[in-house]
Image (cartoon, helix red, strand yellow):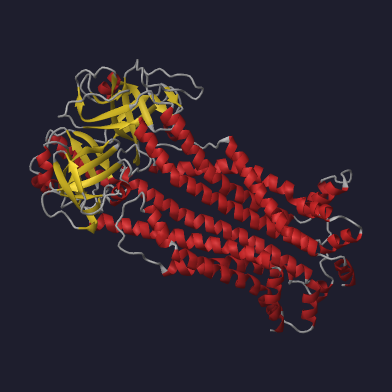
Amino acid sequence: MVINKRIRRVLLENKAQYIGSILLIIFSCFLFTNLVLVSNNLIQLMNEYANDYVQEDASFTTDKSINNLDTLSLTSDLVIEEGKTFDYSLSEGITLRIFTENDKINIPAVTQGKNLNSSGDILLNPTFAAAQGIKIGDVLTIGDKQFTVTGFMMLPNYIVPLKSETDLLYSPQSFGIAVISREDFAAFRKGSNFYAVKFNHKEDSARSQSKEFLGLLKSRGIDILQWTDIGVNVRVSGAAAKFNSASLMGRAMPITVLLLTAVLLSNVIGRMIKRESVIAGALYALGYKRKELYLHYLKFPLVIAGIGGILGTILGIFTVRSLLSVYFEFCEIPMTGIEYSLAVIILSFIFPIIFLGISVFLVIHKELGQSPAELMKGDREKNKVNFLERRFKLEKLKFTVKFKFREQLRSLSRLILLLTGCITATLLLLFGFFLKSGMNYFLTTEVKNSQNYQYEYVFENLRTEPAPAGSEPFAVSKFMFQGDDNKVFHVAGVLPDSKIMTVLDESGKKLRMDQVIITKPIADRLKVKRGDTITIVRKSDYQEFTLRVGGIASSYNMTISMPLSEYNEKFGMPEGSYNGLFGNKPLDIPKNEEYTVLSIEDKIAAIQSGMVPLKATVFFISAVAFIIGMIIIYIVTSVIIEENKSTISLMKIFGYRKREINSLILNSSTIVVIMGYIIGIPLSFAIMGGLMKALENSAPFAMPVTIEPIYIGVGFIVVMFSYEISKWLCKKKVNAISMSDALKAGAE
């Protein structure tokens, strides 16, 4: 059709508006393609890793060694393998956890170099080796023996190589894992035993098989000290949660941006049709069919969707490997290949066409559904006063204020679009600030200020001898909520007159330690208050216990504390026993005892190290929010200028200065932008609250939904800065309108 020749001309005349729409589509398609492909690949690689290298279904420790493992495996119809481990300090602040080589369960995946071939060979995890500058062929001294690094490996039960299950983030600068032969390990004459289990019947529930196996061990007089299902092993479940959140983000955010773009573009196209309604009516009268005009106007969104979809999809595909490398910095999974799903690529290209096509078609159908005679009368609703404008009494206001209010109220669709865009930009912007504030709060309140000790020792076996001077004993074990096997928390027994443990309630009042105290996340989850009774399940044998809540702590850790004597009595432990020590200085522990030690300084250093990539994430999210806000405000402001061409021209004829015209036209949206930001703040709290609840199962703590006041101010500055940039870009359009445009409009 001849009229299709104008498509290129119209796009070039208003290129900034359409380029903005294309950028939004590129961003949404890039996010969808990139995040969905990355999350799908990560999940597939993790599943292949678990199958190929026989990831455990559970691991446990016992009070005594288990003999005749082959017989036990046949009797219980499962695979069981014994492993040994100990921690070795390579240098001050650097710990290497050494494991024996397994050949049945948790088989090391050698990703570079060679496997263990002879005595004196050692394998390291690659992230630790890279952080320490260790290369293949280097020699490490462990004890009195020298080991040669023959290769780098990964363990399927240490996908996130955390030193402790309570750690928030992996720090390769201070912790790594290694594998040596069983013969070399035996030469050290040290280390603790553990057992890995792989069930043969996948059709049966893991809990039923675990319970049956635990019963068999108990019947043989073997007590379980610790039992960890793979589903609650934070070194594995933490990675799965991150992959799933990437997949969710890769679907939710692009759809949100596409919906916003569809509404934005349909608004622009709809107003273009209204301005050209006389031309459309004339074309009808000249013999053009309705279908032909529909197709003509549909080509605008289809061209924009096509360009943005192709560029965004290509960009997303080419950056998949880069984002995977970012994930592999904290998750260790063998990279066996990248699969580029054709379905995801096609969907990425089709989604913008569907969203924009449908939204613009509805607008076209509404605007061109009238008869040619009605269309040729022009836009009869242009100066119609809507109910919202009638409700506000603007007559007594100054002309400048009245003009700005009317400019916004005259078009409700444009007002809602601008408001929604500002709210969306605010939500994105504050999302990053919520994460940063939450981590800062956790670091200062939960780690630095709440801990009155410097060192925490946890022993493999129970101790009954008096605690060393300057320390306090405690006991700790893992429990689950009744009816929920996916969430594990700790129950700790502490001294009722503890000088080290300080627990505060929500009012800041110190709680007595001679009662059962649950933390706020547990209270919220179980919906209990002081005086209520709760039922918990011990992880090691699935036995249920009831506790009466004496107080609720304001801490965000998932922990229950109670007097040590009551703990031992309630859970059937020997009187006076404990398996941990708190201290403010290093303790002199006999060398024949197996234990792990964690200092508060190490924990703080790990969190601070992990906050470095978080800062980059916050910066990226802020930049995205800034760009989205700027594009939306620019396009809406451009629409305002386009609709007020004749008004601006008349103002110039009447002698209004450029500054006055810019103030009237460009500043009319200021109140809407501010309202959008204000509305976005409580919405951000609500959405973050829901997100933190969804992530509770994958974290050993509950992230507080808090934001530092300074970030509220920074967010406002960023939003207003994007608004000012948009106004600056639009000034050229206002200045380009000549006084003759008013005469042309009158002639038409």
Query: How far across and down, in percent of the image, does residue 170 sit?
Result: 35, 43
User: Viewer-proximal residue, 533 or 171?
Assistant: 171
Residue 247 is drawn in which quadrant? bottom left
Tell me if 461 is positioned left or right of 281 in this view.
Answer: left
**Residue 370 at least partly seen:** yes
* The quarter of the displayed image where residue 565 is located: top left
Whether 665 is drawn above or below 543: the answer is below
Measured as percent of width and height from the top left, residue 721 is found at 66, 49
Residue at (37% x, 60% y) in the render: 41
Q: Along the horizontal axis of the image, is 262 left or right of 505?
A: right
Residue lying farthest to the top in this orientation: 497
Residue 350 seen from this side: no
Looking at the image, residue 186 sits to the left or right of residue 652; the answer is left
At horizontal 39% and vertical 41% (from top left) the residue drawn is 699
Q: Nearer the viewer, residue 564 or 741?
A: 741
Q: Which residue in the rendered view is the most extreme toward the right? A: 654
Which quadrant is the N terminus positioned in?
bottom right
- From the viewer's perspective, is 125 left or right of 625? left
